[in-house]
Image (cartoon, helix red, strand yellow):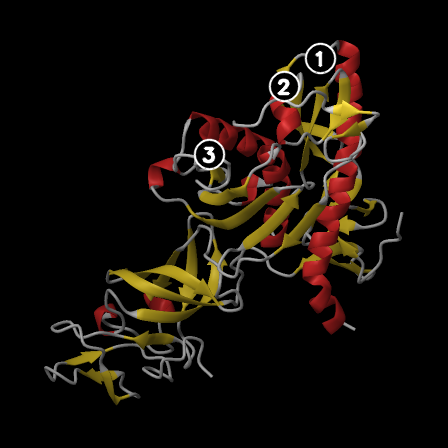
Amino acid sequence: MEEIRTGSFVVPGTFLSTVEEFLPGEGAYEEGGKVYSSCAGLVLVDLRTRKISVIPKSFPPVLKRGDIVLGEVEDVTPQKAEVTIESLRGSEGRQLPPPKLGVIHVSRVSKGYVKDLERKFRVGDIVRAKVGEVGREMVQLSTTEDDLGVILAKCFNCNTPLKVENSKMGKLRCPICKRVEFRKLASDYGRGEPWGE
Amino acid sequence: MAEAKPEKLLVDGRRLDGRRPDELRPLRIKAGILKRADGSAYIELGKNKILAAVYGPKEMHPRHLQQADVAVLRCRYNMAPFSVEERKRPGPDRRSMEISKVIREALEPVLFLHLYPRAVIDVFIEILQADAGTRTAGITAASVALADAGVPMRDLVAGISVGKVDGTVVLDLMKEEDQWGEADMPVAVMPRRKCITLLQMDGNFTPQEFRQALDLAFKGVEQIYEAQKEALKEKYLPSLEEGR
């Protein structure tokens, strides 16, 4: 049998090492004291942490702390805004497995004090946010940074995409009915770049 | 079924297409051929032509079908109307629904379904051209497609049929042998762990013949496993060169 080292190509079920040598990392699993590959990809042997992992070309997306996601606001209450997470930066082509419910607490919306969450988010807004704690049922999100927040909002009256009037205040104006609304804007609001620059 | 039964299916140890009893039909597997699927594979085994596509893991809809602790595996085996000589009425029927079920049960043991609670993994197996042994070839392709999608798996699954024609145990039946032979037994195996995940039988074997047939199936599976590995490696080759 071919020797397994960093850069070897393996398929699911290939024997990698015994647990005494290496612990299973990403893309590997242990059974009966032996470590096997659980995906098709290249082996990575980490001698420092004594872990053996397999790096596949494509794999189901998994949310981790610090990831940037896109979602749609589903509900806004005085304490929190609920967002359905639809896309993860880095795996745009794939659908997300649950949990897809993201929650932005008022304290994590922007740097300053937020008096009224309805002046930061509205149902139907498209939001770019950073992942915090990932739970079984839901994921904590935050939009405190400048490049995070609403990237597309529509007019409450006529559903027209809103234009920026004053980005510092988060002031938006409807080009049709001239209605004024407020949001926690991402710095590149309305440019149509889902992940910013 | 216009053709009449040939006089003999086995002449001087050679089959109708010139194969020996323990020989596979020409096999070709290609991974990742569908752009929009999360994982896909195409297999040609003799005159069989089969596409397999994997979508997910993704959120299960409708919600009442979700399993709170594990992902659900859904399989659909479907024959194209033009896949057989006489036009097949399109849509699911008794046969394809049963095959979908046994394929699901053949693939389930290799997947780590508990990693994706409330999710669903969809596997679609489309038979474009059929020539006996489509369910096992479908399993072979589906397992490559699952690996291509990066779904965590314990092992691959490889399937092959064995049977009996003119009293001889043969590997990988073709249509004529399936039709006029005495027995047909599809087998699906996890090649590394030597676990059988599918075993069906149509016809009669003596216990000795059954042993012999199973041994032959394991030998065939070994060859199919090599082709599966090669297919996955070929898909990864461009990225292998980038890494240098």
The amino acid pointed to by label 2 is: Met
Q: Residue at x 39, y 34 (%)?
A: B89
3 and 2 marks in contact (CB < 8 Å): no
Q: Residue at x 63, y 49 (%)?
A: B147
The amino acid pointed to by label 3 is: Glu
Label 3: chain letter = B
Where is mark 2, residue-wise?
A: B201
Horizontal side, residue B114 vs residue B30: left or right: left
Mark 3 or mark 2, earlier in chain = 3
Label 2: chain letter = B
- Please name whichever residue, B26 or B142, is drawn nearer the observer in this view of the structure: B26
Q: Decide: is A40 above or below B223.
A: below
**Image position, residue A193 (x, y; %):** 40, 80
Do the residues indicated by labels 3 and 2 lie within the same chain of the protein?
yes
Report how far apart the C-alphas of labels 1 and 3 lie in the structure: 30 Å
1 and 3 marks in contact (CB < 8 Å): no
Any part of residue B21 in sight: no
Q: Residues within 10 Å of mark 3 (few under 14, many from 20)?
A: few
1 and 2 marks in contact (CB < 8 Å): yes
Q: Secondary structure at mark 3?
A: loop
Any part of residue A75 in sight: yes
In the rendering, which numbered label is found on residue B205? Answer: 1
Q: Residues within 10 Å of mark 2 (few under 14, many from 20)?
A: some
- Please name whichever residue, A67 or B96, is drawn nearer the observer in this view of the structure: B96
In the rendering, which numbered label is found on residue B86? Answer: 3
- Please name whichever residue, B135 or A148, is drawn nearer the observer in this view of the structure: B135
- Please name whichever residue, A14 or B174, is drawn nearer the observer in this view of the structure: B174
**Image position, residue A178 (x, y; %):** 11, 84
Q: Residue at x 50, y 36 (%)?
A: B85
Q: Decide: is A44 above or below A128.
A: above
**Which numbered disc, 3 or 2, marks the residue closer to the eye?**
3
Mark 1 or mark 3, earlier in chain = 3
